[in-house]
Image (cartoon, helix red, strand yellow):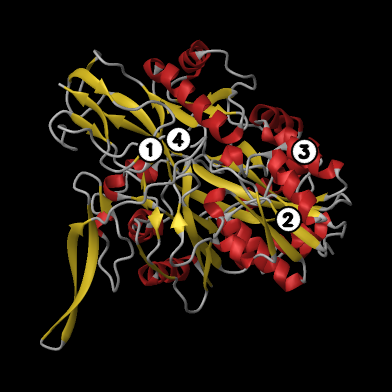
Amino acid sequence: MLQKLLIANRGEIAVRVIRTCRELGVATVAVYSDLDAHAMHVRMADEAHALGGRSPSESYLSIDAVMSAVERSEADAVHPGYGFLSENADFARAVAAQGIVFVGPPAEAIEAMGDKMQARRTAEEAGVPGVPGLSDPLVSADDVVAFGEAHGWPVAVKAAHAGGGRGMRIVPGPEEAAEALASAQREALAHFGRPECYVERYLIQPRHIEVQVLADTLANTVWLGERDCSSQRRQQKLVEESPAPGLDEATRQAMGRAAVAVAQQCGYVGAGTVEFLVERGDPPPFWFLEMNARLQVEHPVTELVTGLDLVELQLRVAAGEALPFGQEDVQRRGHAIECRINAEDTAGGRFLPSPGTIRRFRPAGGPGVRTDAGYEEGDEVSAFFDNLVAKLVVWAPDRERARRRMLRALHETDVEGLATTIPAHLAILSHPDFAAAEHSTTWVEERLDLSDAGTGVPGPRTPSTPTTPDTGRVQRDVDVEVDGRRYRVRLWVPAAGGTTPPEGVGTPRRLRGPAAGTPAGGPGTVVAPMQATVASVLVAVGAEVEAGQALLVLEAMKMENQVRAERGGTVTEVRVQPGDTVGVGDVLAVIE
């Protein structure tokens, strides 16, 4: 077994790995950016080393910074977690070049699967067809238009080196091709360091089903079951479950065999996930989507139905041990559901990033309930990083009991200080379509009514404290007693002053509110709905704009959000530039 493990990540996944290491007697090393000096994963690890910097590119995405920490700590192994450098072949090679164990697949397998275009070719060589599309990088928006005209609209533009739904844009027609490609390239470059994109057919109402695989260094490869991840917004997952409801056993077995074939074709080692899109039919056809050469965010649902610790198995495989079981030994029992509790205001289905300090955090308990969190009370959820606060996972003997258990656990989970996705989860789990497993990857955005999601859902406790951007007020729930009976009353009160990030050499300038003489939110003013970084300015002074036209792109918590004009007119002021950080209510532009 490994002796000392450096975890090249942060938040929930770093905490998750630390817990298994503690059970196995493996010493742990945390790394941290300047913003994470007092983070939960730093507090839990046996030792911690600074990476420096504030942004991901300066810290967790810097191979030099991480390798320096590896050298200082004298760790004999590195676990990359998910995101950041987890699917970076250069990082895997840098670790191996120092004689240190990389807890993940070999660099060659990462390259084969990390480049989504190469992954499509590898899957085809294994006899597994991919979603119809092009396997070469796009040169310009003209390539997108040509593909769409030939194969039909809409199409999907995808970053070749991205993951987790990042760098993906749906293009409904030729007019949107240029902006969609530019946006996908911008996001991919910012978070994964590579801007290459490709295009493929966009399936209208598919299900997103993925298969967990595990392989050792002795050519043993097994699949551990599948997960349905169809409840999504912005191509990013909200709810995952295992097994996939309504999937017939023949298709399940065929998908498992296909996943193993893809893993073996690229020489995979460790835990990985092969993702498919499944269309309606009898039997339902399925298409290879991509392979994630790392541990998935949603791995706990597979752990609960199989009884296996995937992190422990990762560590044992990395240490050279053989898998302790074969395919015929894998048993799956009951049903598990996971909800990603993200720091987002879900009111009206907007899912706006909601960074802030967690004033109160009371996770749910009881039978069959598990909470994997990267934060505790008093911790700050930064706008610079992913917005995942915690993962709530439940297990029950069947899907309906698991669904009801999740509803109970969501009501029990209490988070104050920032908005979360819990109201959206309650709406999803309560909907008849979800109960009947009649949802798809587009269902949340096209069918689910989230008009009341930001104001809570009736229950014993309101599980979210959203901020109203246009008024600067926050929701507070107060307990009162009348004639001996207790009631909960909802109030909207002025928000406390926001926290201004420290400024210094090399940090973005922070706008400190509207200029004198221009009231925030007044007629013609365009204000920031969230704390964010300006990614792009799409208009200039003097431009004539129409109501609904995109003016700027803000980025927060690894999500891009367009700010649109509420009325037409002439742009008389643009007060920001790319790289600026803005807060709620800051004036971005003025239209007259």
The residue that disc 1 covers is: 510
Counting residues from the start of the chain, the first of labels 4 and 2 encountered is 2
Marks 1 & 4, CB-CB < 8 Å contact? yes
The residue that disc 2 covers is: 6
**CA separation in Å, label 4 and label 2:** 30 Å
The residue that disc 4 covers is: 508
325 vs 504, left or right, is right
Mark whose residue sits in front, 4 or 3: 4
Q: Which residue is drawn at 55% across and 40% down?
A: 277
Marks 1 & 3, CB-CB < 8 Å contact? no
Counting residues from the start of the chain, the first of labels 4 and 3 encountered is 3
Count neighbours of disc 4 (C-alpha within 10 A) and say few if under 14, some if 14 to 19, many if 20 or more.
some
Q: Can residue 266 be seen in this view?
A: no
Counting residues from the start of the chain, the first of labels 1 and 2 encountered is 2
In the rendered structure, which amino acid carries the disc numbered 4? Pro
The quadrant in which the N terminus is found is bottom right
Closer to us: 278 or 312: 312
**CA separation in Å, label 1 and label 2:** 34 Å
Hey, which quadrant is residue 22 in on the image?
bottom right
Label 1 element class: loop
Residue farthest along the bottom direction in this orientation = 484
Q: Identify the mark at residue 109; answer none if there is no mark.
A: 3
Closer to us: 339 or 305: 339
In the rendered structure, which amino acid carries the disc numbered 2? Leu
Mark whose residue sits in front, 4 or 2: 4
Counting residues from the start of the chain, the first of labels 2 and 3 encountered is 2
